[in-house]
Image (spheres, rainbow, N blue to C red):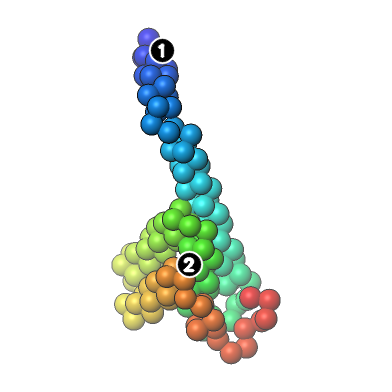
Amino acid sequence: MKLSLAAILCVVLMVSLQDAGAANIFRRGYNYARDFGGGARDMWRAYSDMRRANTIGADTYFHARGNYDAARRGTGGRHAAALISEGRELWQGSISGRGAEDTARDQEANRWGRNGNDPNRYRPAGLDERY
């Protein structure tokens, strides 16, 4: 009974949205979700590269690069980068007891990259060229 009521409401909603340009609404939602997922993958790739590079002082570079790559995808990617970065810093700063200075430096690099600035500003000397 509840399932059929929910199905009827969905059909009514779909029909009413068609008059309001539903295709455009759904397209924007799809693009946002696609960009969000791509941004999350960009953040994961930056994290994986950071682990693989294992270079002292490269942490802020990979923060900036992950946010930069994700934000270039659009609003969804930018939101994914912000959510992941803020969550990571919350975890590392307040829960794990990492230093406030290190967290502030990472947050600066996160914002720098997310605002479309060149992540190479944070690139340390000696980091492998493939990164």
Which residue in the rendered view is the most extreme toward the bottom?
125
Count the labels in the image.
2
How far from the left and from the top, in percent, is residue 90? Answer: 34, 64
Residue at 50% over, 83% down: 122
Residue 59: percent from left, percent from top: 50, 77
- Type of amino acid at the residue the image marks with label 1: Ser
- Reading the image, the residue beneath label 1 is 4
Near mark 1 (Cα within 10 A), the count class, few <14, some 14-19 or many ≥20, is: few
Q: What type is the residue that disc 2 sits on?
A: Asn
Relative to 44, 111 lies left or right: left
Q: Quadrant of residue 13?
A: top left
- Label 2 residue SS: helix
Q: Which residue is mark 2?
A: 67
Query: Between marks 2 and 1, how big is the CA–CA gap?
Result: 43 Å
Q: Above or below — where is 71 with respect to 27?
A: below
Residue nearest the observer in this picture, 81 or 94: 81
**Earlier along the polypeptide chain: callout 2 or callout 1?**
1
Image spot of residue 78 (x, y percent): 44, 60
Front-most of residues 125 and 101? 125
Q: Nearer the viewer, residue 50 or 15?
A: 15
